[in-house]
Every structure is written in structure tokens, then in C-alpha cells.
Amino acid sequence: MKQRSDTNSVQKVCLLLSAMSSPAPCRLKDLAAQTGLDKASILRVLETLIEEGYVIRDNAQKTYQLGDQAILLGLAMQQRMPVVHQARPYMLRVAANSGDTALLLQRMGGEAVCMDREFGGYPIRANYLEVGTRRPLGLSSGGLALLAWLPDEEINALLEITAPAIKRNYPHITRSFMEDQVAKSRSQGYACVLNLLVEQMGGIAVPLFGADGRPFASLVISALARRIQERRQTLAELLHETAVLFAKEYTGVDHHAALARYNGAATALSA
């Protein structure tokens, strides 16, 4: 992976479209914070995207969001997203047995993107993470599960790439903290993040491994932090059981062997 150059016009378009792929409308300052581009450059690109129908502007609210042309692209890709369809029965299983919100996250470059969501029966729902929401790898429990079971050198490279976005949007989160989270996840066999991004909320997650043994998606239970803490081991077991069933059906990988690959091994993560 290489660093993006923000002097490249095509990269600016890609950065802006990615930033707007979350469901909520974005203000200019939000787009600047997420992309690292200056406001003047953003406005120039947005004008063209608006003219071509890929972005719409709400003049009253001074916000931007994806337009019809971008939506059509998304619809055209629906049939090429097999992991969402494959994982749906397993998400239903997790939501029904936990009572909480089940999420499916997938890695896209240095980000974890929410691909699907299923609510459980508990009255208080974790609805702060919508389908399409993206965050740098390692911040949420699902993103941490995607990061922690990569090789050390790849984790180092990813942390270097995502550091600017994390520093802009989450200044209280340090690289050493993320490295500690990776080591802790590997040791306990699952990722758990509580009260970090949203107060009193949290998530617990396990990776889904592809046939090559690398994590390509993560299965998450998102709920009130206290509900996760009270049932932490039970929820972890539910996620692992479900991941094993998914692997038997689709990838053939030994889920527990893939998890144990880094257990007890010294990490080479460095600041």
C-alpha cells in the first residue's frame, strides 16, 4: 500500500466519494477533516461532482451527500457483494441469540466498512453504526478484529497510513494504544472495544478468515458497554461458534487455528 498524494485530482474524487459513502450528510468541514484536503480543493471537486449527478448539495443545511449517479453504481454492485448474502443467516443467528445488534464489517484498504446490520430483541439498540459507515482499521471492535490478525509488518504499514486520519478525527487515540489493543485481542482471541468512540456503548468481534487464512471480514456484537462486560465470555463463544459455522460452509479454514497463529508470539509492532 502507498500513501495517497492529495495533488492527484482522481485521488481527490475518490477520497471525497469515500467520505460521503456514510449515510449522514456531510458539511464542508467534515469532508476536510476526513480527507485531509483543503476546503478550496474540495469545493472545486464537489462542483464537478454535483454537475455530473454524483453529489447533491442541500443549500439550506449547507451539506453534501451522494447523488443519484452514485446510488446507481451502488445498486449495480449489489450482486457482486457475496459476503453480505453469505453472512446474513449467521448475523441473524448472532442477533437472535445475543439479543443485541449484529454487524458485518469488511476491510477496504485501511478502513473497516459496515456492510450489514441486524437488530436483536433488546429494547436499547446500538444504531449509531449504519450500513456504509467507515472508520480506520483498529478503532472499532470490528476494525480491530480485521487488523489484529494481519502480519506485524502489514499492521505497521497500515498504522502509518491511517495515522493522519486518526490524529485529525480521534486525537485522544494514540498509536501505542492501538498496538496494545492488537496485542490484547490476539491474546484473548477476540477484539473488544468499550466506551471508546461512543460513551456507554461498545462492541465485541471476531474475524472471518478467507481460504488464505487472512481476515477479510468481521462479525460484531454491538451493545451497551455494561451488557457486553457482563456477558463477555458468553458473547465471545457465540461469535466463535458462528464463525466456525461460516468457515465450514464457505472457506474451509480452521477458524481456531487461524486465531491461534499469533497467540503467545512476540509482536514486532513499533511506533
Image (cartoon, grey):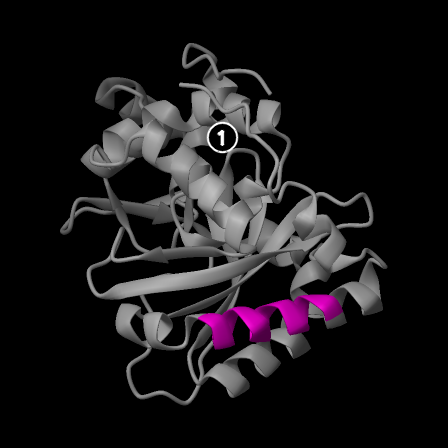
Quadrant location of residue 262? top right
Q: Which SS type dominates the magenta stretch?
A: helix
* Residue 36 as seen in the image, left or right of residue 186: left
State the residue position of label 1: 14
Q: Where does the image place residue 199, in percent across and percent down from the top left?
A: 19, 60
Give above or below for 50 relative to 218.
above
**Residue neighbourhood size for the residue with mark 1, other residues' Cα within 10 Å, grouped as few (<14), some (14–19), many (≥20):** few
- Magenta includes 140? no
For image coordinates 51% across by 60% down, the residue present is 205
Q: Where, quadrant-wise, is the C terminus in this rendering?
A: top left
Residue 120 visible: yes
The magenta-colored residue range is 233-244
Give above or below for 202 relative to 135.
below
> Going by the picture, which residue comes out furthest to the front?
264
> Going by the picture, which residue comes out furthest to the left?
60
* Residue 175 as seen in the image, left or right of residue 77: left
Give above or below for 185 relative to 169.
below
> Going by the picture, which residue comes out furthest to the right?
252
- Near-viewer residue (43 or 81): 81
For image coordinates 19% across by 34% down, the residue present is 29
Mark 1 secondary-structure assignment: helix
Q: Where does the image place residue 239, in percent across and percent down from the top left?
A: 58, 70
* Residue 175 as seen in the image, left or right of residue 28: right
Name which residue type carries label 1: Cys
- Magenta includes 241? yes
